[in-house]
């Protein structure tokens, strides 16, 4: 099966090893550490008393039909190694490399949250203020739910603001890309519904 867009999986593996800071790392040790990641994948959950099942990266790629993967391992706040596996697109020969660009998707959430919290720490944003007091090019449409409680930065960051649309499909290369305002209002060429408040902010996690 061929895909118009690459079906890619980006993995950020953060591995910490108890290695002395000044200890030189031989090429053999380096390759051994890489092999531990490549052949040591585990399921998200383990059951106490049962043997931990470990899987090989290439096997999982075949099972999940993922043509390409990029891995970067961070050790002591530095990239210890990075490698690309597989190809950019199923049925093609172009390989994934460490320079391949991937869609950030939800990996962008903690980055955005960190930036927002830094601005809050500096007093430039307020966690519990109505976000419409700060928004300019677009504002959260008010309704009976927002009249009861406002949408705040704290609620946005904790997924409890009561907003609709939980995810976005993205857009195929060489097709029209909507503006931020079009995405927020669900207007063409956006391929998702409008962002609206449909439950009381702060009432539930979603």
Image (cartoon, helix red, strand yellow):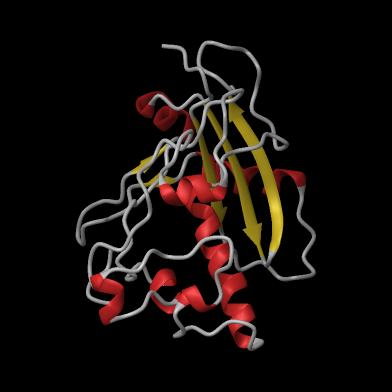
Q: Nearer the viewer, residue 119 or 99?
A: 119
Would you say residue 16 is visible in this rendering?
no
* Horizontal side, residue 194 vs residue 68: left or right: left
Image position, residue 164 (x, y; %): 31, 56
User: Which picture quadrant has residue 63?
Assistant: top left
Which residue occupies 55% across, 19% down? 89
Would you say residue 143 is visible in this rendering?
yes
Residue 63 sits above or below residue 184 on the image: above
Q: Nearer the viewer, residue 130 or 62?
A: 130
Q: Quadrant of the N terminus?
A: top left
Image position, residue 202 (x, y; %): 28, 77
User: Which picture quadrant has residue 186?
Assistant: top left
Which residue occupies 57% across, 78% down? 117
Residue 69 sits above or below residue 105 on the image: above
Which residue occupies 50% across, 24% down? 67
Number of labels in the image equals 0
Which residue occupies 50% across, 45% down? 182
Image position, residue 118 (x, y; %): 63, 79
């Amino acid at each position: 099966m061929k895909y118009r867009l690459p079906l890619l999986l980006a993995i950020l593996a953060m591995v910490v090893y108890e290695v002395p800071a000044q200890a030189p790392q031989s090429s053999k040790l380096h390759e051994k550490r890489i092999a531990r990641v490549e052949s040591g994948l585990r399921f998200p959950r383990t059951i106490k008393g049962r043997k931990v099942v470990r899987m090989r990266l290439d096997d999982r790629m075949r099972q999940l039909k993922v043509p390409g993967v990029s891995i970067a391992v961070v050790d002591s706040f530095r990239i210890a190694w990075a490698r690309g596996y597989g190809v950019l697109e199923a049925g093609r020969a172009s390989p994934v490399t460490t320079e391949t660009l991937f869609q950030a998707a939800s990996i962008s959430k903690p980055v955005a949250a960190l930036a927002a919290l830094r601005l809050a720490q500096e007093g430039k944003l307020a966690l519990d203020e109505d976000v419409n007091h700060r928004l300019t090019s677009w504002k959260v449409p008010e309704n009976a739910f927002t009249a009861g409680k406002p949408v705040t930065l704290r609620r946005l960051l904790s997924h409890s603001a009561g907003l609709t649309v939980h995810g976005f499909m993205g857009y195929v290369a060489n097709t029209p890309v909507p503006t931020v305002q079009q995405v927020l209002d669900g207007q063409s060429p956006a391929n998702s519904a409008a962002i609206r408040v449909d439950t009381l902010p702060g009432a539930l996690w979603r």
